[in-house]
Amino acid sequence: MKKICSVILILIMLFSFVSAAYAADGVLDAPTIRVSNVSRTGKILVRWNVVEGAEKYEIYRAGSRSGEYKLLKTKFAKAENSFINTGAVAGKTYYYKVRALAKDGTPGEFSDIKYRTCDLAMPEPTVSITVKGYPKLTWDAVPGATGYRIYRTYDLAGEYRLMKTTEKTTYTNSNCVIGETYFYRVKAICGKSAADSAQSNVVKATAFSNTKITAPESVTAYYGETITIPVTVETSLEDCTVVCNPYGSKVDCGWVGDWDGDTIMLEIYGKSPGLGEIRISLEEERDRGTLATIKVYVDMRDERLFDIAAKYVCNNIREKNGISELHSGVSYLHIDRLRACRDFEYRYSDNQPYQKGGEFCCVIIIEYTIKDVIYNKPQKKKATYGVIYRSQSLECTYVGGNYIRYDTKQLVDLDVKPYNERYGYNV
């Protein structure tokens, strides 16, 4: 036990002697340093490793490798082994070296010299949405910057592509799709020197329109009839005007009363039979132009033309199908339902437009009942006919049902009574 205590005592004494000798000789190791830039500010960060026996560290800086090195900062070893050169100027290159000091002030060896260029501070953009729904980026001017680059991506983890280089501190992304979400970064440019800032933190924006016009997508009326539809406008802007413009020569329009900032009634009247179109826009009276636009399709039907078509179809049922069916023992024909549908989107099976030039297509769908003479059992049938009008005269006859395309929303019922009186029969 005494031997163990003696050994420990000897070691303690030896350690004290070595430490005293180390301090007396003043031989402290040279630190190993690294330099980099702080992303947010662009300033130069100097870091070094811990030197055994160091009480303090001195950081020196010069404007060139062989220039005069001046003491920038003295830091105690208990503090962090790093220093940010907040006084560095963007675009300038600085040279650094660090040494340790012993407790009695004896300096150690200097580190190797490291150099770094001070970068520009990173822009800090914010994003808003313009009245037209475009993302708009805004940021404060960065001291020393000669311009800015704006980058964009569709995917947060994707590649950012340069959208624009500008000297301004705003950017409006008008080249976007309403409803899409985008991610942006901004970088400050430092003229000809390689001291551009890091790209900013990501800002996110979804392009959307905060101005909205609501009206029926399509309306139907007979030619010569005037109809009125409501138009609602939602906007937070002032000094706006609601404008209606007829497109083509089929229809015309006009406002009923003044727009009260919410709803206004639009009067529509037909100039000729056919499919017309009205475009309703919200205009900003200063410099923003058209804020929103919608289309209203107006189907101006001519009742006489439908009557011509219906008569032709009913006669076709009676004269072609009816007679042959009578010979087969048919004793009864009754028209149950007669519907008309007119549109410009009818097509053949080969996907070619059915409507050509000044012609337009009318479809008649007829549902009728026949009875057998012997068994007197009713049989329900349905047929679809397509006819073309030119100059209000019937030209074309039957088109097979497989080749006719029509929208059931555009079907209107016709009164079957006069057609039954003329074409129905009961033997």
Image (cartoon, grey):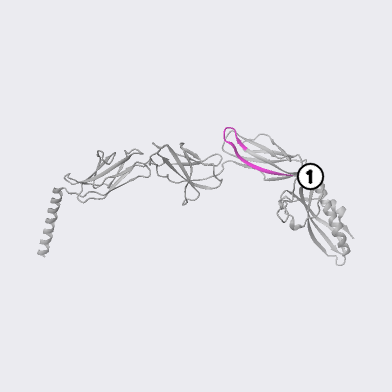
Residue that badge 1 annotates: 302
Q: Main secondary structure of the magenta part?
A: strand
Magenta span: 282-299
Query: In the drawing, does residue 332 fall left or right of residue 384?
Result: right
What is the quadrant of the C terminus in the image? bottom right
Q: Nearer the viewer, residue 293 or 399?
A: 399
Q: How many marks?
A: 1
Does dot 1 land on a helix, a strand or a loop?
loop
Q: Nearer the viewer, residue 329 or 151?
A: 151
Work out which residue is located at the far front of the displayed protein and give it.
66
* x, y percent for residue 159: 47, 50
Tell me if residue 214 comes above or below residue 12 in the rendering. Answer: above
Query: In the drawing, does residue 270 fall left or right of residue 136?
Result: right
The answer to whether residue 291 is magenta is yes
Q: Which residue occupies 27% across, 43% down?
A: 96
Identity, as a three-letter code, of the amino acid under mark 1:
Asp
What is the quadrant of the N terminus in the image? bottom left
Work out which residue is located at the far bottom of the displayed protein and give it.
375
Q: Nearer the viewer, residue 373 or 67?
A: 67
Which quadrant holds residue 282? Answer: top right
The answer to whether residue 361 is magenta is no
**Pointer 1: residues within 10 angstroms few (<14), some, or many (20+)?**
some
Q: Nearer the viewer, residue 298 or 141?
A: 141
Q: Which residue occupies 82% across, 63% down?
A: 378
Tell me if residue 157 comes above or below residue 296 in the rendering. Answer: below
Tell me if residue 415 comes above or below residue 249 in the rendering. Answer: below
Query: In the drawing, does residue 68 fall left or right of residue 326?
Result: left
* x, y percent for residue 236: 56, 38
* x, y percent for residue 50: 24, 50
* x, y percent for residue 68: 25, 38
Q: Which residue occupies 11% across, 59% down?
A: 10
